[in-house]
Amino acid sequence: MPTMADLAGFDAPAVRAALLAWYDQGHRPMPWRFIAPARPDPYHVLVSEAMLQQTQVATVIAYFHRFIAAFPTLAALAAADEQQVLRQWQGLGYYRRARNLHRAAKQIVVNHGGEVPADVAALRELPGVGPYTAGAIASIAFALPEAVVDGNVARVLARWLALRHPIDKPATQRWLWHAARVLAPSTSADRPGDYNQAVMELGAMVCSPRSPTCSTCPVARWCRAKAMGLADQLPVVSPRRRPTTQTHHILALRRGRRLLFSQRPDTGLWAGMWQMPTLETDSGQISPATIMTWGREHLGLTLADPSQTHAFTHLTTHRAITFRLWRSDVEGGRLARGAGQWRELDDLTDLPLSNPQRRIVALLRNQDNHPPARRRINRGADRCSR
Ligand code: SF4
């Protein structure tokens, strides 16, 4: 394990000064970012930090503008219906963040008079706010001397300090947090929010995961990894586990011009979002007869000769999900209570859909406009956030 001796001799004040000077000269503009003494709206920081978890800045900016236009204040977000919130988040993935943000806004209204609390302990009480997010909000929105450790910070610190231990291990993470606190500014006057953003900016723009550009790095002279010729070998990370594989059989069930949509459960993957009825399995193939039986038992519907038309694979952090699209007309039966809603494909604006479901809807719309000469299974693969 690394020890505190690993921090000895590291000239933190000089690194902070060089880093902030670099940041002041050329940081990326972001709608929630202001340079001290100007301060951002704490609500904007809360929203941006929720969106930035697992998602890159370039992707977040358009969603941030859209979200703030829909919910201009924390009170407006707290008063919104969860389906509206999910709808504004649609496409950004990792929808639990949206649900947690919504719950956090409600909690802030009830417990803090509608003002984002300027206190790490109180921030940590909010749904979805872990140590990183609490430190980020406290330092960026309120200039409190709090440290942060996310993926970018961990990589930068591991290189500054030539850390040879896997940064994903809990003990190393604890050490990194300690190191981050030692190195970060200890007073508000020393711009802790800007410093934290500067470290993350360095990690994103210069000290990149595979090819750090040390020749342009503003803190290269203090970097131990560079001095030891280890910059592109650090940080050390544990081997990744293979993602679990699943198959989701999506049933595009037609009754006239309308298709059936149902809501996912309140917990788990894509919680609370809408989809075409889905049969989830660990194995790849099932028969049309199985689809018909499932439709009868779970939906109360008699299906006509289901046929599979498309398949594609969607990768999330821990799963490789193969989507198989089945199409069938509904011949009879009575839709089971709570099994869903019949909707035309042009009437889905109020239903939040995950990215794979949106892909399937687009595909069905396209097929409706351009019916295929003959049916065949198309295969594809994509990688995107949930
Ligand atoms: Fe990263 Fe290279 Fe700068 Fe060190 S010198 S912090 S490895 S970019």
Image (cartoon, rainbow, N blue to C red):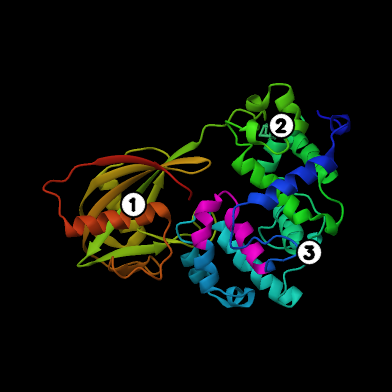
How much space separates mark 3 and mark 1, taking CA atoms? 43 Å
Is 110 part of what is drawn in magenta?
no
**Going from the N terminus, do you reach mark 2 or mark 3 first?**
3
Q: Residue furthest top?
A: 229
Q: What is the x, y in percent for residue 289?
A: 25, 47
Which of discs 2 and 3 lies nearer the camera? The answer is 2
Is 61 part of what is drawn in magenta?
yes
| Residue 139 drawn above or below residue 375 | below
Residue depicted at 41% across the width and 54% down the height: 355
**Going from the N terminus, do you reach mark 3 or mark 1 first?**
3
- Rendered image: mark on residue 250: 1
- Find disc 2 in the rendering and name its residue: 159
- Rendered image: mark on residue 122: 3
| Front one among 326 and 195 | 195
**Going from the N terminus, do you reach mark 2 or mark 1 first?**
2
Question: Label 3 is placed on what type of residue?
Answer: Ala
| Front one among 184 and 170 | 184
Magenta segment boundaries in residue numbering: 43-63
Q: Does any atom of ligand 1 lie closer than 8 Å to the CB of label 2?
A: yes
Secondary structure beneath label 3? helix
Q: Residues within 10 Å of mark 2 (few under 14, many from 20)?
A: many
Tell whether 238 sits left or right of 244.
Answer: right
How much space separates mark 2 and mark 3, taking CA atoms? 32 Å
Tell whether 69 sits left or right of 193.
Answer: left
